[in-house]
Image (spheres, rainbow, N blue to C red):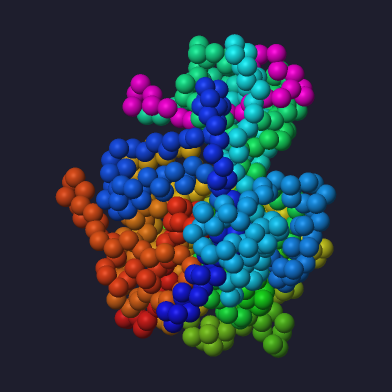
Amino acid sequence: MKKKGRDLLEAFRKTFLTLQNRTPRQIKMDASSERYCYNPILRWNPQVEDYFIKAYGSLHFAQISKALTHPSCYSCIRVNTLKTTSDAVIEKLQEIMRKSGSENDVEDISIEEIKANNSIDLDMAEKQLCLQNWSISKCQIPGLEYVVFVKGSGPHAVDYGYAPDKPPKEVLVSRKCAEAVLRGAQVYVPGVMACSAHVEEGDAVAVSVAVEQPAPDGGWGLGITRGTVLQGLQTDPYYFERNGLYIGQGTTMLSRAGIFRASQGIAVDMNNRVFKLPSFHDVLEGEIFLQNLPSIVAAHALDPQKGERILDMCAAPGGKTTAIAVLMKDEGEVIAADRSHNKVMDIQKLAAEMGLTCITTYKLDALKAVRKSNGSSDMTTLCCNKDNNDVVIQSSDLRPLESGGSSTTTVGLNADTNCKENGRQYKSWGLCMRRFSSLPVIQVKNQTTYLIIKMPRVTYLSLILNILVSNEKANERTYVSKADIRKNMRRMRNGPGRNQSLGGRVENSKGFLPHSFDRVLLDAPCSALGLRPRLFAGEETIETLRNHGKYQRRMFDQAVQLVRPGGVLVYSTCTINPGENEALVRYALDTYKFLSLAPQHPRIGGPGVVGSCQFSDGYIEEWLRPGEEELVQRFDPSSPLDTIGFFVAKFVVGPKET
């Protein structure tokens, strides 16, 4: 097993030594290039910095901080193998890059430079040089052949046309805009904060970034108003703060007035970037998905099988959800839940785009993922009487209008018989169905209530649907009108119309029953301190980091209940914070004795952090214990893999105590 792991790491190392293209050439620095360059320094809260130094060591954390300010040297693409193949995608992308000229972005590097930088023999250097002639390559790790790497380059020195006493025209963008530009995006209108005077459409401009600075109130802020005029002189707001924060040069698509009047559109077309990474916007939609490598590994670690029922608890934007569905060959059931309506819509759109039919989406808060049991079923059960074609409807969701408690209504020709057959007793506390004044109603207080109606089955369904809708809006509506009933009956006959299509509606979920899933993926919301490039981290404090950990424990408590005995639970985050990673694993193993860490395949990340940390208030945060570090995967931004910061832990669920 160890030999196999070493072989995997060696194969991966060869791949990434090929992909990495940090230019080794020394760039001559003069007075202008010291300012007009990209050399950011990531600022941390002092207490947070001390905490991370305890976890990683001073030198290692400095390397991590530096790596976070740069994007990865490559783009990682997951191929939808249900529609195409990796070879076909590579061929199409090469054709697209040839037409766009993107393949010329890759710099030539000599064998001597490769050998000097990577400390490998001449034969290996020649092989790498041969591979470098191709900017697109397939992953060589067994099981990940559907992953394609597209190599970028950088950092590059950009000539902004500086002359003494004549600084270049500038466009200052927000930090979030700059982080997107460094990943290959254009500068869009909402991201522009300030601009030089007399900028016209078609002008060449230097693009710099405004990073939050300490504010007088102790917080962080920009201290610059959108629309400020930049002069390139020391009197400019944040003139000195912009030193070393120039991300490239572009051509304006609008004049200065147009930039600050428009609400959308491209403001600057970036044609000379510090980092050159191809954009995959609207490229091969449905066939490929741009996704970070550790995220792909997390879905792979779950090891989904055909026919299984799997839950992705915090699924947005749907990358891991669709990866799981593809690994299952679209056979089984993948439940994707998220608490945001719009994010659930995005998952639906992505699943449709990729042609996946096994994905069902719900709007659901992960903290309420387990359905509370109240002694009666929360599901509506439809039973048909074989003899008379009537319908028996049993639902604990039906609420009376004249009582505050819940009740259950049984509708059918022979309700007595059906109740006995189902082995249930239905109580009604002051049940009243007067909303249907034209229907025969039997009203009995504090006794079993039966509503005996002879109507077509579609009418029963229509009535119940309206009751359920009214219950969801109990505070807004106090009755269901006959007009609503007739309208709903027409919809039942004619089928869903445009307003009832999936394009604008998201189904809410009340949660799921315990032990109802074979596998659960909890990619928990986190501090996101592993995402790259990152230009600001000062807002995180020790308190906020600890709060993230508490929040994730609550979600994990829900996830554990949903996995059946013998199932699998995978936990992942995109942060470098041990309190959200190793500390969560420690909590899980100490709290739930039926959980155990399981090996992950493929394993290409590094070991976890062992030890503990004591805070100023006396609280001791425990991480992994010796022997456990090799059972998790920690992706280090400063490692040769050049990925985002990420963490994956895989648990096997043993027999649970009743």
Please state if 470 lies on the left or on the right of 41 as rendered: right
Please state if 95 lies on the left or on the right of 534 as rendered: right
Q: Residue 63, relative to residue 517: is it above or below?
A: above
The answer to whether residue 361 is visible is no
Residue at the image position 67 percent from the left and 74 percent from the top: 330
Residue at the image position 66 percent from the left and 41 percent from the top: 185
Q: Which residues are magenta?
A: 195-218
Q: Nearer the viewer, residue 164 or 236?
A: 164
Q: Nearer the viewer, residue 164 or 112?
A: 112
81 in the magenta segment: no
Residue at the image position 42 percent from the left and 76 percent from the top: 599
| Residue 222, percent from left and from top | 48, 25
212 in the magenta segment: yes
Q: Residue 650, relative to residue 361: is it above or below?
A: below
Please state if 211 lies on the left or on the right of 206 as rendered: left
| Residue 130, percent from left and from top | 68, 62
The answer to whether residue 95 is visible is yes
Q: Quadrant of the N terminus?
A: bottom left
Quarter assignment of residue 90: bottom right
Q: Residue 554, relative to residue 567: is it above or below?
A: above
Q: Nearer the viewer, residue 278 or 552?
A: 278
| Residue 271, percent from left and from top | 71, 35
Residue at the image position 46 percent from the left and 53 percent from the top: 637
Q: Quadrant of the C terminus?
A: bottom left
| Residue 502, percent from left and from top | 71, 58
